[in-house]
Image (tube, helix red, strand yellow):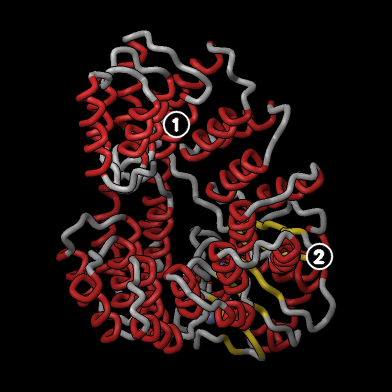
Amino acid sequence: MEITTMTHAMQLHAQIIKTGKNDENTPALSKLFTFSALSISGNLTYARSIYNSLHNPNSYFSNTMLRAYSRSPDPNQALLFFLALQQNQQQQDKFTYPFLLKSCSHLRAVHEGKQLHALVCKAGLQADCFIQNSLIHMYSSCGELDNATRVFDRMANRDVISWTSIINGYVDSDRSVEALHLFERMQDDGVAPNDATMVSILRACADSGAVSIGQRIHQIIERNKLDSRANVVTALIDMYAKCGCIENAQQLFDKIVAKDVFAWTAMIAALASHGQCKKAIDLFHQMQALNIPPDERTITGVLSACRNSGWVSEGYYFFNNMEKNFGIQPRIQHYGCMVDLLARTGRLDEAEAFIKRMPIEPDEVLWRMLIWACKIHGDTIRGEHLMNQQLLNMDSNDSGSYVLLGNVYASAGKWHEKARVRRLMTQRRKEKSPGCSMIEVNGIVHEFVAGDSGHPEAERIYRKLDDIAEKLWVEGYQPKLSEVLLDIKEDEKASQLWHHSEKLAVAFGLISTSPGTKILVVKNLRSCEDCHSTMKFISKIFQREIIIRDRIRFHHFKDGFCSCGDYW
Ligand code: ZN
Ligand code: ZN
């Protein structure tokens, strides 16, 4: 007999109680217990009361409780329940640990996770594949990728879940190039990927701008008949869009018959980052016409479309109505879009007031956006004031704030103040986080940091840069020295500026691809003014389309112009 409602389950329970067998592990009791614990229409508290009434619950009952708690809104309950089991010296088996480790993953509780790992070893279960997979997932969710890798490397037999968990761990930690290598190894091992693997690896391609690898993954997806999965198609749309191929993304999107909120959101975000803001907003209206409720990411997409176009009144409209119309409370990322929009369009007063009125605590990123805009709009006094008042008190671990303040001073020529910030940064032991750019050539992703000399082709790259510099000077290029941080001599400043990571990546692109090939570079920071104007020159002189994806949006350089219209 099938149990479908809690009422039904309780009626059955009443019958069992009448027979006096309610404290024994009978099949009927186990069935209604499982329904209460695991079904969507179940009742976890009721399941627990059944559990408590048992004289001698076996491990099926305890594991079912753990499983239910681990996926409940309060996974901490699983750990507490396990503690009680241990105190009562109740038996555990290999099914016990995966649910506990899953709870630790949700809770980012690495300390408890390590204790469980020790218990697993004590129980002699460390070679169990299911448990090893859970350990990999736990360590990587907690940001301990080294430990996750250690577990992975020691495995005798790895299944698709092992591979997917470790790949996903690397992607989550922004180590997409290593994730791509792992995927190669997985294929060499002959393990067939599933949809979750494909979603992870497409994210790795998107993050590193590896479009030709992405296209190859697309073929693998079709070969493995995973191209009807909604999550895979959405990941493909995202990958193509982030690799600059917005048309491919649009084609895939148009082919989906029943589009879910994730597909709509991916396409809206794609259009927004390509600066096609009107299209993004039109799409949002179409989605509403179809009665598909947006989620908070959809709204972020719409707001970033407004931000990337400088559409202040539209931005205000969507922001002010998101709660009323869609029941979505503004979160930090929504505030972030608004602050950036106001600040970038030069409404510095309004942006500052906006941050101060926020009902949630503004984070460092928000203040940084405003200070960055102060620098662009030449309001050094405000920038400096906000910096001292807001950012330096936060004692953040991020060196970005210090670099930014240094920039504010540098652009005002206040080298003395700039030196003070640098001292402060050293005192607080902040390392300047390096700008990093990636470019894929012939299926291999190359990474560059500023002033990099580690690349095997470094000599040729620097020679190419000299060649570019000569041609640019003839065309009238002037370096934007205000972008340089250090109080060093003018000619050194120029050379430092000239070795920014995206310039190295583009120079490498020029020497290693045939004339006319599009160059795509992905960068982890916002583009600097000097690199931006250099790219315009290069696109004209070398007749190349150059696409740069920075942290915020795409810049599509062609014939000396950029698609952003110099607004970013
Ligand atoms: Zn630069
Ligand atoms: Zn641009």
Position of 250 with respect to 114 (left or right) is right
Viewer-proximal residue among 143 and 325: 325
Viewer-proximal residue among 286 and 302: 286
Numbered circle sitting on residue 420: none
Q: Amino acid at mark 1?
A: Phe
Q: Which residue is mark 1?
A: 99
Q: Classify 455 as above or below 147.
A: below
Position of 196 with respect to 474 (left or right) is left
Q: Classify 319 as above or below 153.
A: below
Image quadrant containing the N terminus: top left
Image quadrant containing the C terminus: bottom left
Tell me the quarter of the picture where residue 406 sits. bottom left
Q: Residue at x 27, y 19 (%)?
A: 21
Question: Horizontal and vertical percent for residue 120?
Answer: 52, 18
Numbered circle sitting on residue 442: 2
Badge 2 or badge 1: first in the primary sequence? 1
**Residue 372 in view:** yes
Q: Residue at x 58, y 70 (%)?
A: 242
Q: Secondary structure at mark 1?
A: helix
Question: Horizontal and vertical percent for residue 207?
Answer: 59, 61
